[in-house]
Image (spheres, rainbow, N blue to C red):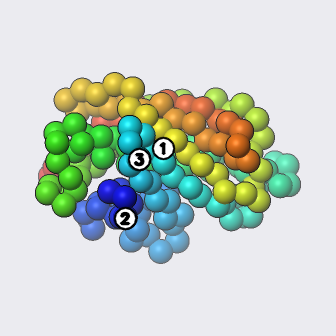
């Protein structure tokens, strides 16, 4: 999955998410990539996502980034666990059942944000992902998502 982002493999009918849907014209179009044992995403926030203090990111954006990135990691991890690539079989789509975010430090808006997530636990239809968001080399938020696989139909 080095060249194409995980989200680029989502079926058209499930590619409309505001955060990661490639078919949502108004969306954020985040892109996640599988690297070794973790998923990585780089995102430069638009100034419209300023929070209560000028120059810093709105907490809701941080949660959205973590949500969408974790779902992509769950999709890729399930396929990887089965020994397959997205060219061999379509990705399963996951949605959040739970998202916990700890905001550790203010996150500057004028820089690239990096998200790194790792699979903590997998089940038949459930994946738990731990995730960190960094800016300027410092961890700004940390969280955990419980994701559930959507039915194929």
Task: Please state which of residues 95 and 119 is positioned toward the viewer in this rendering.
Answer: 119
The residue singled out by tag 2 in the image is: 3
What residue is rendered at 52% in x and 71% in y?
Answer: 26
- The extreme right residue here reads 54
Q: Position of residue 85 (x, y in %)?
A: 20, 52
Instruction: Check disc 3 and report the residue beneath it.
Output: 35
N-terminal label among 1 and 2 = 2
What SS does tag 1 mark? helix
Circle number at residue 12: none
Q: Which residue is mark 1?
A: 67
Q: Nearer the viewer, mark 3 or mark 1?
A: 3
- Looking at the rendered structure, the secondary structure element under dot 2 is loop
Give the farthest residue toward the bottom. 25
Q: Gap between marks 3 and 2, in whole Å?
A: 11 Å
Which mark is first along the chain, 2 or 3? 2
Q: Earlier in the sequence, mark 3 or mark 1?
A: 3
The residue carrying pointer 2 sits among few (fewer than 14), some (14 to 19) or many (20 or more) residues within 10 Å by Cα, namely few
The secondary element bearing badge 3 is classed as strand
Report if residue 51 is visible in the image: no
- In this rendered view, identify the residue nearer to me: 37 or 129: 37
Are discs 1 and 2 less than 8 Å apart at CB?
no
Query: Could you tell me how far apart the alpha carbons at marks 3 and 1 are, in whole angstroms?
Result: 19 Å
Q: Position of residue 55 (x, y in %)?
A: 83, 55
Counting from the top left corner in percent of width and height, residue 129 is at 42, 32
Task: Name which quarter of the figure residue 137 lies in.
Answer: top right
Residue 136: x and y in percent read 73, 47
Residue at 67% across, 36% down: 139
Query: On the picture, is 124 further left or further right than 45?
Result: left
């Amino acid at each position: 999955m080095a060249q194409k982002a995980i989200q680029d493999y989502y079926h058209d009918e499930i590619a409309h998410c505001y955060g990661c849907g490639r078919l949502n014209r108004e969306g954020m179009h985040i892109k996640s990539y599988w690297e070794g044992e973790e998923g990585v995403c780089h995102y430069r926030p638009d100034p419209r996502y300023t929070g209560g203090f000028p120059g810093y990111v709105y907490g809701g954006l941080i949660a959205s980034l973590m949500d969408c990135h974790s779902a992509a990691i769950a999709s890729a991890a399930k396929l990887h666990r089965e020994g397959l690539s997205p060219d061999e079989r379509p990705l399963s789509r996951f949605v959040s059942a739970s998202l916990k975010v700890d905001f550790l430090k203010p996150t500057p808006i004028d820089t690239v944000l990096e998200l790194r997530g790792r699979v903590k636990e997998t089940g038949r239809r459930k994946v738990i992902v731990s995730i960190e968001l960094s800016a300027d080399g410092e961890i700004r938020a940390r969280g955990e998502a419980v994701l559930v696989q959507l039915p194929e139909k």
